Image (spheres, rainbow, N blue to C red):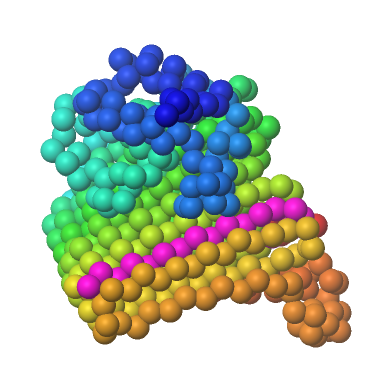
Amino acid sequence: MADVTTLRTAAETGLSKLFEVQRLKLPGAAIAREEAFRYFEAAGLPHRRVEAFKYTDLRAALREAAPPADAPDAETARNAVKTARGFAGIEAARLTFVNGHLVAALSDLAGLPEGLEVVPFARAMAEGHPLLDHLAPVEQTRENPIYQLNAAFMADGAVIRVADGARIERALHLRFVGTGSAPFSTATRVLVVAGDDAEVTILESHEGPDGIAYQPNDVLDVVVSDRARVLHSRLNLEGDAAIALSTVSARLGAGSHIETVNVVTGAVLSRHQLYLHFAGDDATATVNGAAMIRDGQLADSTLLADHAALGGVSREQFKTVIDGDATGVFQGKIIVRQVAQKTDGKMKSDCLLLTDEGQMMNKPELEIFADDVACGHGATCGAPDDDLLFYLMARGLPRAQAESLLVQAFLGEAIEAVTHAGAREAMIAEIEAWLSRRG
């Protein structure tokens, strides 16, 4: 048989060239980076023929590989943060990242609450911090090209440890801000290890300049030890030309709980991946999402909940509002292993189409190998209810205001899951801001 030559895109070729240069500069184990990039190189940028990326063709969308952003100078960092709005009004300990690099002068590294330890990721990699053994806590991420691309290029971030039994009352805000006049890329990694019986609230916001085709690829790895609680709220406020890739992977111990909610208004293309592994008995998870998109945007939420222990409970609810010719994507899978008897998993995706030009792709799945479970999934898609609109308009509300009220009520079900009151209010404010821009 004749040899088959795989044609590589300009972006894939560019990434290979960038890696050859960057691998000599980046801290940490060169072998691990090499393995991650070789996996990505063999797989290539995912495209429509890859089932997990059937509706999000990165090979077609990513035309060129943007160079990794350099660490900003002090003035550039200060100016970038001045206009940052994500969770800005909330009292929190902040870790500020500008162009993917931790800026100590704009972060609360000193005076952190008792029981909370933060180590800059670049330093942790250079020193071989023992907590780095917890990276990639969910096995399936090792076969994900986006995750492996981050593993190859990750330059900075944070290693966060919550001591056993510690209840961190003050939220920790991971503030990511991009700035620049030309395309750039970032690859950040944050590792959170919550000890037994610990509790912590993590707020995460991402924003950057409009009109610049920058390419963030961020990963949050979470280890939730026995009976620990991690509450996570995330805002995607990226610039209107960004291609934003993100992953949350979490390993749940016995009796533990994770809450993660992602709100999307930014980026021309975004893909948010969630991997949950129920490793201990009686673990619970609440996973919600709300996306508001318009004018050619594509927002992809992809979820895998792997129940591999007794009595796990997972609730997943995603809401998408589509205006203009935007495209929404939801792919969710619940796997129940044979040992995971008494699992209770429910997953739902709802879409509200405000125009005829938009489209929504729903692909919920169940794989059940146990016989004593209660699992289900569902998906809906439709226009605003004419009767409800008429009811509101008959009481004197203009159509636009009546429609806005319906949208807020539709999205509110997902946002109500946020435990932190300040984060919940901030997310509601972003919904209102998006609706006001719609006019």
Asked whether, in this view, residue 323 is left or right of residue 290, the answer is: right
Q: Quadrant of the C terminus?
A: bottom right
Q: Nearer the viewer, residue 334 or 270?
A: 334
- Image coordinates for residue 144, horizontal then vertical, percent: 38, 44
195, above or below 42, in the image: below
Q: Position of residue 123 (x, y in %)?
A: 24, 27
Q: Which residues are magenta?
A: 322-338
The front one of 82 and 186 is 186
Give coordinates of residue 362: x percent, y percent. 57, 64
Relative horizontal placement of residue 171, taking residue 129 as reference (left or right):
right
- Residue 414 visible in rendering: no
Q: Would you say residue 332 sits in the magenta stretch?
A: yes
- Residue at coordinates 56% horizontally, 46% vertically from top-left? 48
Magenta span main SS? strand
Instruction: Please say if 366 is above or below 439.
Output: below
- Visible residue check, residue 307: yes
Q: Is residue 96 magenta?
A: no
- Name the image quarter holding residue 322: bottom right
Of 418 and 108, which appears nearest the observer? 418
x and y, in percent, of residue 166 in the image = 18, 58
Q: Quadrant of residue 397?
A: bottom right
| Residue at image point 61% right, 22% down | 182
